[in-house]
Image (spheres, rainbow, N blue to C red):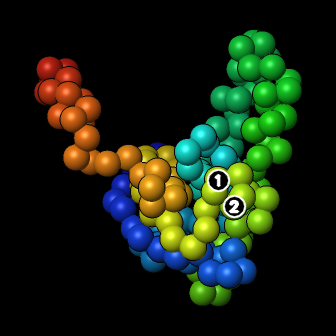
Amino acid sequence: MLNLMDSFEHSVDNKGRLVLPSVHRDLYRDGGVLSLRGDHLALYDPASWTVFMERLRVLRDEQTLSRSEFNSILGSSSEVTPDAQGRIGISARIRAAARIEDKVVILGVDDYLAVYRPDAVPSPEMPELADLMSKLDGLGL
């Protein structure tokens, strides 16, 4: 079970390559999958992608998720493999869809790395965070 966390500011070079945070590179040594997730890209390691796909298939089979929606998720995903410098290539199509240009913020969000445009990163100073922490305190966490 993963427990990815922390925040990293990185750049995407003019060829669309992103250097992975050094602390997480081993996890993606054998590759991973980039997938659009609304306001960010999700970078799954192979095991987490397998779990995600198993859940998606269940939703598709239950008809909670249509075949078209299922196909859209896969069509907006891409396999990536880091090079010797720990860089992954983000296709022009996926960069455009996520509106990623040259700067990104990478957040560890438990089971994947979230790649955000700097203007889309959830702010830890948001008032909602205080409400969330109060909720967690009430749950005994």
Residue 123 or 63: which is nearer the viewer? 123
For image coordinates 77% across by 65% down, the residue present is 92
Rate crowding at label 1 as few (under 14), some (14 to 19) or many (20 or more) other CA atoms within 10 Å.
some
Q: Are marks 1 and 2 in contact (CB under 8 Å)?
A: yes
Q: Which residue in the protein does label 1 denote?
A: 98
Compared across the picture, whether 85 is left or right of 132 comes to: right
Q: Which residue in the protein does label 2 denote?
A: 95
For image coordinates 62% across by 81% down, the residue present is 13
Rate crowding at label 2 as few (under 14), some (14 to 19) or many (20 or more) other CA atoms within 10 Å.
some
Residue 38 or 2: which is nearer the viewer? 38
Disc 1 marks a residue whose amino acid type is: Ala
For image coordinates 25% across by 41% down, the residue present is 126
Is 94 drawn above or below residue 139 in the view shown? below
Is 68 drawn above or below residue 41 in the view shown? above
- Tell me how many marks there are: 2
For image coordinates 72% across by 58% down, the residue present is 96
Disc 2 marks a residue whose amino acid type is: Arg
Residue 73 or 28: which is nearer the viewer? 73
Q: Position of residue 116 (x, y in %)?
A: 51, 56
